[in-house]
Amino acid sequence: MARTLGRIILVPIAFVLAAGVALFVIFSLGQERIVEALTARRSDELPIGAAFDLISLGLSLFSVYTVLPALLVIIVGEVARLRSALYYIAAGGAALAVVPFLTRLDQPARALELAPAVWQVLATAGFAGGFVYWVVAGRNA
């Protein structure tokens, strides 16, 4: 009984911490990509369109579509009692990679074309969030 109560308290705290870390990575790494695009430091990088894609996606991160994939990952991990760091890290990256598709369901397929820098930022943030969740709650599932 005490273990179950502890999990009920620990899982939401771990989720909030992981989401905070993922948002921090999105905004810090996204800011770096935007500055690189504005200063044209790397010529092989896509132009300022990638920055606008990242900003618009960042604004849509406050919708319910961003919480659902992460909650699904956590529910599967908790029910199956998965303790693998690889599961939480890979699933965290996949959960954030699905977000652009979910936020643009009602738009044409052309609207789903995002710059590679945006996908890189989202995957990195998902990996970081998955790792933080595993450290706080996942390794004791």
Image (cartoon, helix red, strand yellow):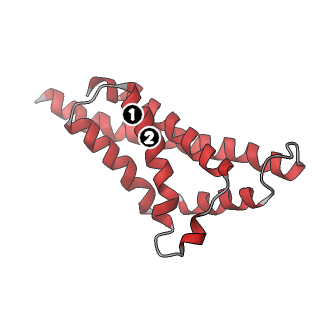
Local packing at callout 2 (Cα closer than 10 Å; few below 14, some 14-19, many 20+) is many
Query: Is residue 98 found left or right of 58 in the rendered image?
Result: left
The answer to which quarter of the image holds residue 9 is top left
Q: Say which residue label 1 marks.
A: 88
Q: Are marks 2 and 1 in contact (CB under 8 Å)?
A: yes
Q: Residue at x 49, y 61 (%)?
A: 101
Q: Position of residue 108 (x, y in %)?
A: 54, 75
The residue furthest left is 1
Can residue 92 be spotted in the picture?
yes
Quarter containing the C terminus:
top left
Which residue occupies the foreground of this view, 57 or 12? Answer: 57
Q: Establish if 19 lies above or below 82.
A: below
Local packing at callout 1 (Cα closer than 10 Å; few below 14, some 14-19, many 20+) is many
Q: Position of residue 25 (x, y in %)?
A: 60, 40
Q: CA distance from mark 2 to mark 1?
A: 6 Å
Disc number placed over residue 38 in the picture, else none? none
The answer to which quarter of the image holds residue 73 is top left
